């Protein structure tokens, strides 16, 4: 259904109809979010995007919101940010195995003489959640001496409201035939309606009658989507529309594999300033994993007069390798580091940065030092690649910090 306009005095829309209209229009909000990766520096080298495409790698080290079990600041034997809520005496912080860092959570329960199943469970504290896809994952090590005929090792991803009332839950089960080595267990789910919080339930071990389970949980995390990226860029002339791609780690610099394309978005040149600055771009890519490696591509575009330049360093950084190539195919050439930041689609400081709505319409909001809106860009692409709408709205505030007019250009 296409909603074009209301005619004043003639259009009558009741609450139910209006709600159905809004429901039919897909939309998402992207806040400032938690920084997940990025390369910054004092370099001022300008890399001309009319001459080459550039690609740089990043690792989503801190998309994860929970992480390791390294800290126990009050010495109660329970990791910070965690709760052992079911049969806590059979759970402990362990140092005999760790996937990353030096610690894990160990569950050890011998139910060989039991006549009923016993659940041993822990969970993370509730954290803020948005209406986006979340992925919960854990690394599990099942001891080969375990007997798990009627048992299971599980992770749950739970969504709740502010009061902790459950709005939805999803689970994934470890392969109990894999023992003596670490295995990753992952589950993804869209946050359910009414969700404001989420958490993981782990460890969660159901020990069946007659069974014995020894298992270690490590690096249990909640991973939201990649919400946005910032590039330090500057526009020359009228610039050129900027095409950003996200590709997986199948990329090979010899040009035989450019990596699988996960996302490709075109942004209008108008939103890029003529003075170098970090500009935020909405990405909204779900399914990214903690410790996953991805490649950020900015495609070649423009001419000698009108183009964008990406700011970077005068030296390489092995943690953030950069390659460029002048053509659409072939080998890439190793180059110097570029400036960028990656942010999870999480609440962060609750500053709304972007909205995505309807048929690929987008906004970008910037704020001043007082937290007031400096300006809002909004744009909508047409089917022919042009821009149906691309305008900047700048507020004028009164003495009380209330916007009284909006200038549009």
Image: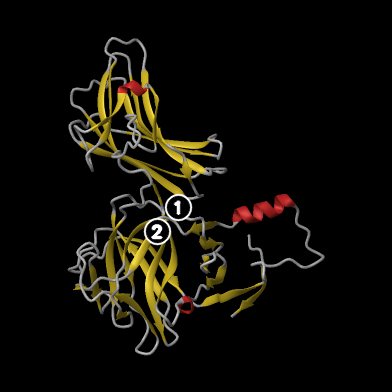
Find disc 1 in the rendering and name its residue.
346
Q: In the displayed structure, does residue 166 sit left or right of residue 228? A: right
Image disc number at residue 343: 2
Q: Residue at x 70, y 67 (%)?
A: 5
Q: Position of residue 60 (x, y in %)?
A: 32, 54
Q: Quadrant of the C terminus?
A: bottom right
**Mark 1 and mark 2: span between their CA atoms?**
8 Å
Crowd rating for badge 1 (residues with CA inside 10 Å; few <14, some 14–19, many 20+):
many
* Quadrant of residue 264 within the rendered picture: bottom left
At x 48%, y 53%, the residue is 347
The answer to whether the residue labelled 1 contacts the one labelled 2, judged by CB atoms less than 8 Å apart, is: yes
Q: Residue at x 36, y 23 (%)?
A: 88
Looking at the image, residue 191 lies above or below residue 44: above
Residue 185 seen in this snapshot: no
Residue 288 in the image, given as x and y percentages of width and height:
35, 52
Image height of 362 relative to 191, above or below: below
């Amino acid at each position: 259904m296409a909603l074009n306009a209301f005619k004043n005095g003639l259009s009558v829309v009741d609450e139910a109809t209006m709600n159905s209209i809004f429901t039919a229009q897909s939309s998402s909000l992207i806040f400032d979010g938690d920084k997940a990766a990025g390369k910054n520096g004092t370099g001022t080298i300008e890399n001309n995007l009319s001459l080459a495409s550039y690609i740089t790698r990043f690792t989503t080290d801190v998309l994860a919101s929970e992480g390791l079990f390294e800290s126990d600041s009050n010495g109660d034997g329970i990791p910070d940010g965690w709760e052992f809520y079911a049969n806590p005496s059979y759970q402990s912080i362990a140092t005999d195995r760790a996937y990353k860092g030096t610690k894990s959570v160990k569950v050890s329960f011998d139910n060989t003489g039991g006549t009923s199943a016993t659940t041993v469970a822990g969970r993370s504290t509730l954290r803020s959640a948005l209406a986006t896809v979340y992925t919960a994952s854990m690394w599990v090590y099942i001891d080969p001496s375990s007997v798990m005929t009627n048992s299971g090792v599980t992770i749950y991803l739970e969504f709740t409201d502010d009061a902790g009332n459950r709005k939805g839950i999803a689970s994934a089960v470890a392969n109990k035939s894999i023992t003596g080595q670490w295995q990753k267990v992952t589950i993804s789910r869209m946050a359910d309606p009414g969700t404001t919080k989420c958490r993981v339930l782990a460890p969660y071990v159901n020990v069946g009658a007659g069974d014995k389970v020894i298992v270690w949980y490590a690096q249990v995390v909640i991973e939201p989507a990649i919400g946005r990226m910032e590039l330090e860029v500057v526009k020359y002339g009228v610039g050129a529309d900027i095409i950003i791609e996200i590709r997986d780690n199948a990329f090979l610099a010899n040009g035989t594999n450019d990596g699988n394309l996960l996302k490709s978005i075109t942004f209008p040149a108008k939103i890029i300033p003529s003075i170098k600055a970090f500009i935020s771009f909405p990405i909204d890519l779900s399914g990214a994993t903690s410790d996953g490696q991805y490649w950020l591509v900015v495609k070649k575009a423009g001419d000698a007069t009108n183009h964008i330049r990406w700011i970077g360093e005068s030296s390489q950084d092995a943690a953030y390798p950069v390659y460029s190539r002048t053509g659409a195919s072939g080998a890439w050439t190793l180059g110097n580091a570029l400036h960028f930041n990656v942010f999870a689609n999480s609440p962060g400081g609750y500053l709304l940065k972007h909205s995505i709505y309807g048929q690929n319409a987008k906004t970008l909001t910037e704020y001043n030092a007082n937290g007031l809106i400096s300006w809002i860009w909004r744009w909508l692409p047409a089917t022919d690649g042009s821009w149906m709408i691309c305008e900047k709205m700048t507020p004028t505030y009164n003495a009380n910090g209330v916007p009284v007019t909006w200038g549009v250009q």
